[in-house]
Image (cartoon, rainbow, N blue to C red):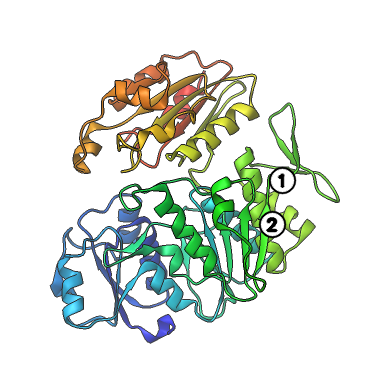
Amino acid sequence: MSTSAYQHIHMIAIGGSIMHNLALALHRKGLKVTGSDDEIFEPAKGRLQAEGLLPEQEGWFPEKLQPLPDAVIVGMHARADNPELLFAQENNIPIFSFPEFIYEQSKNKQRIVIAGSHGKTSITSIILHVLKYHGRKFDYAVGAQLEGFDLMVKLTDDAPIIVIEGDEYLSSPIQRVPKIHKYHHHIGVISGISWDHINVFPTEENYREQFRIFVEMTPKAGSLIYNQDDEQVLEVCVPNKTDVNYVGYTIHEHKIKKSGKTILKTKKDDVEIQLFGEHNLRNISAAKEVCKRIGIKGQAFYEALATFKGAARRLEKIGENEHTLVYKDFAHAPSKLKATSEALKKQYPQRQLIACLELHTFSSLNKDFLPQYKGTFLAPDVKIVYFNPKTLEHKRMPPLDPQDLKAAFGDEKIEVFTDSQALQEFLLSQNWKDKNLLMMTSGTFGNLDLQKLAQTVTAS
């Protein structure tokens, strides 16, 4: 059913990163969109307010669903006993999770789903950039704000394909299966598998099984593109169907110039790119394989890639002078921490690297999960781990002992901070000549202004 069949859609947990983007996309198509949430932060708050979609007050109000909407979309932030959700169930209003709704709107399109514990945002972003560069029609749902794209979701009636960043987290509070199982891909990608979301997938085997199911869902004549350098991926991507096209990929052939620029080696000409790091060189290979299957090959791909600056918060440069670079990155899981810190150190080996990691997610703050970080934070010269005790309280988790944290990482030299102001003072006290700074988090470092910090660090 196309969105034109709906006049009014109500969104429970409208303030979520991807949910508020969907709300804006549907509103701009002319639908009536209402919604609720018990907390809405920037940038979602300002963006919803600018288009008249910000709820008048925070909280849940079943009366908002009268008269009855044509459909309800429920975000994962809501609970199963949410009053609005219960009202929708009692009144037989069609209820969709985010992935269900995206699938509902793309049944007649070729669906490309990028899955994996890490790298999926970057791969999706590269594909979208290449498609836009070449003027192709496409829909999308991606987890990061991209340069040149106003929204993170686009749904039209005429685009022949949709590119989806496929999160393995649960679909909704009443549909406790991974989102990637709900999109029913024609072309699937698995970028890497590294245990995460311990609150939902209590064992590595249970987590890995979700990707095996995704692989098995690849249809006849479909394609499964996978990272052949990842042992966990190889365990699930066993080519056992003769009617499925299995495609392994690896690091793109390249060289690094003394200036720190990365050059891709291609059949025709060398191509200078703005990305760097082995993980991104794998991401490029994955995106290239996808683009090949939708009609963008070889030099056309590289021509577009040369202009790609990267996705927001994915090794994003936020400060620079002649002897210092400052980057921020969404890294928080062990595999992401390792890949990002190693990439920056390898790209600029002549400079010292000071790296800060914020533990913010349920998994990263779980004492039983922390040993997964052992050996993943070796590249930086100065290693800093920050966590906010208030985050632990909010998540109803026991306190963390800094000494236990150091033991889990296997490194007594790690500096541990629990106060963002003290962290900032420490960083500003450093001599930044011939040093780079890397700030890694899926949170906010206790509302630290990273842009201002970067400006101060690179002012000298």
Name the residue carrying label 2. Answer: 288
Q: Is residue 218 above or below residue 133?
A: below
When asked about the image quadrant of residue 169, the answer is: bottom left
Three-letter residue code for mark 1 = His
Judge by depth and name the residue closer to the eye, 127 or 149: 127
The answer to whether marks 2 and 1 mark residues whose Cβ atoms lie closer than 8 Å is yes
Residue for point 55% across, 77% down: 109
The reply to whether residue 318 is visible in this rendering is: no
| Callout 1: SS | loop
| Circle 1 Cα neighbour tier, 10 Å, few/some/many (<14 / 14–19 / ≥20) | some
Three-letter residue code for mark 2 = Lys
Q: In this view, does 44 lie above or below 423?
A: below
Which numbered disc flags the more N-terminal residue, 2 or 1?
1
- Quadrant containing the N terminus in the rendered view: bottom left
Task: Find residue 441 and name its label.
Answer: none
Horizontal side of residue 218 vs 59, given as left or right: right
Horizontal side of residue 62 vs 194, given as left or right: left
Residue 373 place in picture, x, y as percent: 43, 33
Residue for point 40% across, 16% down: 412
Residue for point 28% across, 26% down: 418
Residue 30 place in picture, x, y as percent: 39, 78
The reply to whether residue 353 is visible in this rendering is: yes
Tally of marks: 2
Residue 120 place in picture, x, y as percent: 53, 53
Q: In this view, does 242 lie above or below 198?
A: below
Residue 196 place in picture, x, y as percent: 40, 46
Task: Find residue 252 and name its label.
Answer: 1
Report the Cα–Cα distance between label 2 and label 1. Answer: 10 Å
Horizontal side of residue 207 vs 242, given as left or right: left
Judge by depth and name the residue closer to the eye, 41 or 349: 349
| Callout 2: SS | helix
Residue for point 37% across, 67% down: 98
